[in-house]
Image: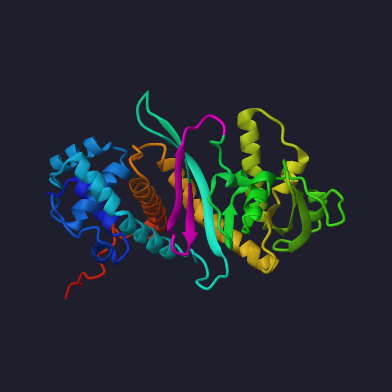
Amino acid sequence: MENAMDENWRVLLSLFPGRWRDQAVETGAVARLRGFPSSEALLRTLLLHIARGFSLRETVVQAKLANLADISDVALLKRLRNSEEWLRSLCVDLFRENGVALARENAASQFRIVDGTIVKEPGKTGSQWRILYSLQLPTLACDFFEMSPTEGPGTGESFRRLPVRQRDLILGDAGYWSTAGIEFVHQQGADVLVRINPQTFIGYSPAGRRVGLLSRVRTLSQPGQIGEWAVMLQGQESRVAGRICAIRKSEHAIRQAQRRLERKASKKQTKIKPETLEYAKYVMVFTTEAAATAEEILEWYRLRWQIELVFKRFKTLTQLGHLPKHDERSSRAWLYGKLFVALLTQKLIRVGRAISPWGYNLHPTSQSLA
């Protein structure tokens, strides 16, 4: 009789991209399967470490007890490193399955999504780390990965910690709203597309007058109406020219956003400012990219937001787990593994309403009964 663990694994297998076994071979992850009976056993062992939060040593013990592998923790670390490209390709396939159009292949700029999170390792004395990473689109290639303490100067989320190249278009959420960070990117010959934090926004018109952000967006009275306004940011060494692009949300989205603010204020026992509720009616971004239309800019940020939904789930998963701190390669593989688990979770939620009576999808190659 199949135990619950094996049954759960079969459910997960039904959600994997169709070519996951082929990709294991193509990426070199299973060039030599010493210590593992199959690519399936390898992936299952890796997910014990990545998804369950076991240390490398705990993982090899659990894998041996489950007859998945007979290897050392050092050998498992090497396997994790060699699986980086395999795990990345699985993430790309699942993003596409989820309907996320990653980016135009022929885009003039190199799209880069920047994000960060805190990793809290298990136990009362578990270490806490801040990780900052950059993913290229459409490949999802991780071109920057940095771990740092969570306290001290220079450890926060900032564009200034990122290596920037000319023609980069760096997409960030409101946590990266900082005139100093935007100025840094601009000085490197690159562009930014970042969500505005209205509480700290200070901008000027080309004539040098202070821009009233709320007075501008209030002119957008209909759902889906778009506006754009030229604006200058005053950096420490120079002014940065750009524009505000904004869109009014649907009435349903406005109610949802305002309810979230009300719940947050109730929890913290604070009072919401009227302008905060007003700002919740719009999505407002700032960009230095001059060639694209406002519609294109907002569409690019929508892409960032779609992936942010996966990142949010990823961030809840990173609160548990032993982050490999040996080298960038193993850390990037761990990152892709966490994203893979987040995407599987999202897919399970999506298909759960229509799942078959027996609880999982049949393999595409399975034959029907005659």
Determine which quarter of the picture holds residue 300.
bottom right
Residue 359 seen anywhere in this rendered image of the structure: no
Name the side, left or right, on which 148 lies relative to 212.
left
Whether 170 is among the magenta residues is: no
Image position, residue 87 (x, y; %): 33, 56
Image quadrant where one finds the C terminus: bottom left
Q: How many marks?
A: 0
Image position, residue 167 (x, y; %): 58, 63
- Name the residue at 67% across, 44% down: 180
Residue 201 seen anywhere in this rendered image of the structure: yes
Depth check: give the residue in front, 320 or 275. 320
- Name the residue at 57% across, 70% down: 108
Depth check: give the residue in front, 181 or 323. 181
Determine which quarter of the picture holds residue 169.
bottom right
Image position, residue 364 (x, y; %): 26, 69
- In this rendering, the answer to whether 207 lies above or below 324 is below
Image position, residue 201 (x, y; %): 74, 45
Colour convention of the picture: rainbow
- In this rendering, the answer to whether 176 lies above or below 111 is above
Name the side, left or right, on which 54 lies relative to 152.
left
Q: Which residues are magenta?
A: 133-153
Residue found at the far bottom of this picture:
370
- Name the residue at 57% across, 66% down: 109
Residue found at the far top of this picture:
124
Whether 142 is among the magenta residues is: yes
